[in-house]
């Protein structure tokens, strides 16, 4: 990243909200979609005390967040209860959490690395937050500071951290490190030193290695065994980088990369890591080029794109260039469809994540404290939502489980969505599994939990689906 955080940091809430009202109204889509059963519907969520830069759905279904930017210390965690609307403070970590990396451990605790000293200068701190006890535990420091690192849960339950800026002279930390959970220490992968872009997109692959899906042109595997080894998988079909675009694993081992770059692109491409020789291939482009966008996998397996700017430059905040029309990608066709249009620009430092009620919580963007909630079209089809009467609190991988529901006769799919942990377009905890393996039983259904390597242990939102219409989820610990 050549343009630092300070560009946005100097332009705070007052400047953003000083734009005339007309400039903040949504621009017309090329084919305006106003029917909720076709385009979904936007509504205001809570007006938050700050614009969040980091956000997570906790195992108790509450939403944790913290801020940053504009001289605001990021060590101010809050929790929003979607059911009651109550926002409460949580204990502080003891260091600036802004620009950190994070993911959930298999037991539901939140693992956090790095943080903020100043622009492009990172902390070497690491900590674990226990939501049940509202307590932070500081860990041994990493080798060097990391500002904008990415963390990834490995199949072993250990955690990989890569990249993150050390300081303005060193740039990105080249040494991948693995937190060895059982040993309580860091292992540096000194044979795999490589300077990656900041906040790289990293996914646990079917072969147990970690796949770097961008934002650079060359994509690679990292083998975390021994002292570490990188191997090139291939260059993406889109010739440029996808800085501040989106990347999601929309099915085990299958990744969609979309948008990003400068100037922003509307292109999209996919890769199947289950193939003998994985290679990127282009799929349909979005209607709108986007940078600083968010991508969210929905319970029906489709991917929602929200926010971003189509303007050039690191952080273009021209309201006329904000992309407020959502788009939805269907993996069955490889095509995008325009959805309803939001009112608030969502650019640099914006966030979107899936809630357990199957809506999408969208917030942030420098200066904007007013959140929005997007209800996808599946909530307006007229088909009643299935309900979950009971589900196990935890279940092993690849085993049969019973889900109680009065709608067993009409449930035809089950999806597992890993709890999101999002910042800067990057959900570091993202994983998705969908199954039609269902047996109807008295009082509910029987299905089999995922056992795919790319579906790591941890807490998932378990949804029942009826012809693509999802239930409200139950949160189940897998593995």
Image (spheres, rainbow, N blue to C red):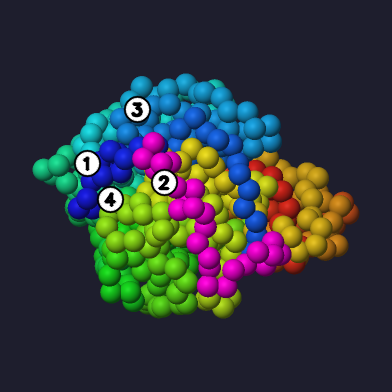
Nearer-N-terminus badge (1/3)? 3
Where is 320 relative to 133, above or below? below
Query: Which residue, as the protein is rendered here, is positioned at the far right?
Result: 442
Residue range in magenta is 14-38
Q: Are marks 1 and 3 in contact (CB under 8 Å)?
A: no
Q: CA distance from mark 1 to mark 2?
A: 29 Å
Q: Which residue is mark 1?
A: 120
401 magenta-colored? no
User: Does the image show residue 446?
Assistant: yes
Q: Are marks 1 and 2 in contact (CB under 8 Å)?
A: no
Q: Nearer the viewer, residue 154 or 307?
A: 307
Q: CA distance from mark 2 to mark 3?
A: 26 Å
Q: Which residue is mark 4?
A: 198
Q: Are marks 3 and 4 in contact (CB under 8 Å)?
A: no
In the rendered structure, find residue 19 and report the number of the disc placed on it.
2
Nearer-N-terminus badge (4/2)? 2
Q: Secondary structure at mark 4?
A: loop
Q: Secondary structure at mark 3?
A: loop
Snapshot quadrant of residue 217: bottom left
Nearer-N-terminus badge (1/2)? 2
Return the x and y of residue 338 as percentages of the image width and height.
56, 68
Nearer-N-terminus badge (4/1)? 1
Nearer-N-terminus badge (3/4)? 3
In the rendered structure, find residue 73 and report the number of the disc placed on it.
3
């Amino acid at each position: 990243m050549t343009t630092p955080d300070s560009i946005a940091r100097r332009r705070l809430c007052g400047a953003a909200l000083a734009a005339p009202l007309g400039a903040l109204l949504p621009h017309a889509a090329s084919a305006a979609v106003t029917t909720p059963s076709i385009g979904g519907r936007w509504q205001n969520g809570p007006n938050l005390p700050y614009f969040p830069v980091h956000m997570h759905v906790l195992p108790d279904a509450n939403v944790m967040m913290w801020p940053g930017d504009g001289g605001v210390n990021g060590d101010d965690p809050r929790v929003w209860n979607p059911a009651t609307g109550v926002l409460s403070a949580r204990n502080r970590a003891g260091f600036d959490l802004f620009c950190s990396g994070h993911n959930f451990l298999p037991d539901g605790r939140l693992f956090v690395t790095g943080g903020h000293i100043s622009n492009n200068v990172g902390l070497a701190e690491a900590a674990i937050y226990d939501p049940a006890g509202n307590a932070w535990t500081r860990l041994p420091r990493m080798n060097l500071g990391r500002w904008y690192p990415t963390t990834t849960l490995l199949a072993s339950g250990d955690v990989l951290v890569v990249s993150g800026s050390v300081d303005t002279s060193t740039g990105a930390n080249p040494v991948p490190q693995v937190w060895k959970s059982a040993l309580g220490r860091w292992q540096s992968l000194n044979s795999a030193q490589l300077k990656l872009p900041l906040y790289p997109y990293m996914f646990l692959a079917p072969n147990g290695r970690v796949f770097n899906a961008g934002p650079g042109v060359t994509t690679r595997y990292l083998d975390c065994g021994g002292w570490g080894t990188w191997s090139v998988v291939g260059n993406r079909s889109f010739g440029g980088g996808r800085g501040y675009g989106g990347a999601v694993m929309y099915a085990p081992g299958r990744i969609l990369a979309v948008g990003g770059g400068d100037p922003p692109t509307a292109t999209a491409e996919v890769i199947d890591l289950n193939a003998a020789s994985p290679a990127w291939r282009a799929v349909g482009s979005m209607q709108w080029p986007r940078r600083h966008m968010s991508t969210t996998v929905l319970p029906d397996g489709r991917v929602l794109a929200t926010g971003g700017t189509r303007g050039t430059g690191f952080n273009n905040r021209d309201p006329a260039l904000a992309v407020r029309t959502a788009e939805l990608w269907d993996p069955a066709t490889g095509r995008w469809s325009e959805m309803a249009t939001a009112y608030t620009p969502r650019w640099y430092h914006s966030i979107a994540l899936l809630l357990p009620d199957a809506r999408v919580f969208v917030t942030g963007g420098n200066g904007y404290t007013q959140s929005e909630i997007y209800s996808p079209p599946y909530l307006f089809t007229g088909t009643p939502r299935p309900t979950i009467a009971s589900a196990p609190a935890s279940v092993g991988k690849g085993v049969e489980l019973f889900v109680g529901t009065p709608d067993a006769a009409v449930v035809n799919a089950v999806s597992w969505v890993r709890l999101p942990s999002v910042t800067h377009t990057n959900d570091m905890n993202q994983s998705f599994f969908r199954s039609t393996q269902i047996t109807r039983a008295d009082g509910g259904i029987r299905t089999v939990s995922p056992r795919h390597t790319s579906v790591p242990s941890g807490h998932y939102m378990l949804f029942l689906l009826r012809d693509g219409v999802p239930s409200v989820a139950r949160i189940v610990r897998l593995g």
